Amino acid sequence: RYVFGKRTVLLLSIAFAGQVFVNVGYLTWMPSFLHEQYGLKLDVASLLALLCHHAAAFVGVTAGGWLSDRIARRRRNARMHFEYLGLLLGAPFIWWMGQAGSPTVCCVALAGFGLFRGVYDSNLFAAPFDVIEPRYRSSAVGVMLCFAFVMGASAPTILAWIGQQLDMATAISAMGVVYVVAGLF
């Protein structure tokens, strides 16, 4: 009752579900998208999709964690701000991934998405821990993960459907809308 009665936990859970939806959709379809869109060999497309994104995410996690810890000493909700900023600032890069005119531009967009995903991830559990009593933290994480797993599992199918109805570039770009909605939550 405590966890489900905490509005903040529910909102953060919905936001996390949106983030995982995008992450699973990205991991599922980006290598194929790069291969088909730009004619890259599948191994090169897979490497670029993951390396550009995850290298930048490493920077985002490291910098976001360090900076949010410093700011949180003075501002109680600083970690929450890093959460929504990571999502809202990452959204344009997600849209750009689907609309990029070349593999190089797409890799820049992948890196921008990765950087801000890292900023979000750096506060993923620290933010709710700022508002949850210590004895309920594991339960809160469990609720967040349940929301995320259910939404994430639907991403490949939903994106494939959008790709069939329109095209995969539109499906990739549409994930930016999910990031905006998650950021608003």
Image (spheres, rainbow, N blue to C red):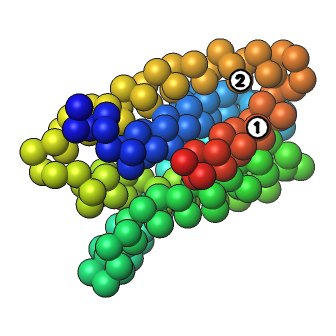
User: Label 2: how many residues lie within 10 Å, few (<14), some (14-19) or many (20+)?
Assistant: many
The percent position of residue 39, horizontal first and vertical second, equals 83, 33
Q: Secondary structure at mark 2?
A: helix
* Residue located at (71% from left, 45% from top): 176
Q: Secondary structure at mark 1?
A: helix
Q: Amino acid at mark 1?
A: Ala
Answer yes or no: do the residues labelled 2 and 1 have beta carbons within 8 Å? yes
Using the rendered image of the protein, determine whether residue 136 is visible from the camera's viewpoint: yes
Residue 135 vs residue 74: left or right?
A: left
Between residues 117 and 131, which one lies in front from this camera angle? 131
The percent position of residue 115, horizontal first and vertical second, equals 54, 60
Using the rendered image of the protein, determine whether residue 47 is visible from the camera's viewpoint: no
Q: Quadrant of the N terminus?
A: top left
Between residues 183 and 39, which one lies in front from this camera angle? 183
Residue pointed to by mark 2:
159
The label shown at residue 174 is: 1
Q: CA distance from mark 2 to mark 1?
A: 9 Å
Using the image, determine if residue 107 lies above or below residue 16.
Answer: below
* Residue located at (56% from left, 32% from top): 21
Q: Which callout, 2 or 1, points at the residue further toward the start of the chain?
A: 2
* Residue located at (51% from left, 19% from top): 153
Q: Which quadrant of the structure image shows residue 29?
A: top right
The percent position of residue 76, horizontal first and vertical second, equals 32, 73
The label shown at residue 12 is: none
* Residue located at (81% from left, 28% from top): 168
Q: Residue furthest left?
A: 135
